[in-house]
Amino acid sequence: MRPVLHGDVSTAARVLLNAPPADRERLCVKMINEADLADSYVGQTGRLHPLFGNGSLMTAARARPLADEPGFDDVQYCKCFEMVLRCLVQFHITRMRS
């Protein structure tokens, strides 16, 4: 996956905000895996992945409906933002062990 920036995390969190709470973690992991797959595809072919884009989390997330971006006074948005960060940490820990 391409380097993750603030915009990637906030975009993914906005997708999660639109999803039912019970589905959010699964969806988050799915977006991260799609971004990683797309990055590998771009590296191998030199072309954008036809579904998941350029390998950034933002591009993988933008394939889905986005909620308007609230402020950090929105508890659900904060939980979604935190979930993206936790899933990214787990992704990197798992990758380092592989």
Image (spheres, helix red, strand yellow):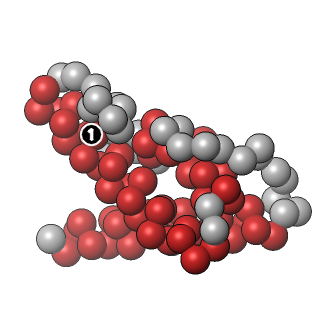
Is residue 72 shown to the viewer in this render? yes
- Residue placed farthest to the left in the image? 44
Picture quarter containing residue 22? Answer: bottom right
Q: Which residue is mark 1?
A: 39
The residue sitting at 19% across, 75% down in the picture is 97
Q: Is residue 76 above or below residue 38?
A: below
The residue sitting at 76% across, 46% down in the picture is 69
Is residue 58 shown to the viewer in this render? no
- Residue placed farthest to the right in the image? 73
The residue sitting at 24% across, 66% down in the picture is 95
Q: Nearer the viewer, residue 92 or 13?
A: 13
Residue 54: x and y in percent read 34, 31
Residue 21: x and y in percent read 63, 73
Q: For this view, does 22 lie left or right of residue 98?
A: right
Q: Is residue 56 above or below residue 81?
A: above
Number of marks present in the image shown: 1
Q: Nearer the viewer, residue 13 or 72?
A: 13
Q: Locate the C terminus by quadrant.
A: bottom left
Tell me if mark 1 has few (under 14), some (14-19) or many (20+) residues whose alpha carbon lies within 10 angstroms of its own.
many
- Residue placed farthest to the top in the image? 47
Picture quarter containing residue 79? Answer: bottom right
User: Label 1 is placed on what type of residue?
Assistant: Asp
Q: For this view, does 61 lie left or right of residue 79?
A: left
- In what element is the residue under mark 1? helix
Q: Nearer the viewer, residue 65 or 55?
A: 65
Q: For this view, does 77 lie left or right of residue 8?
A: right
Q: For this view, does 37 lie left or right of residue 7?
A: left
Residue 72: x and y in percent read 82, 59
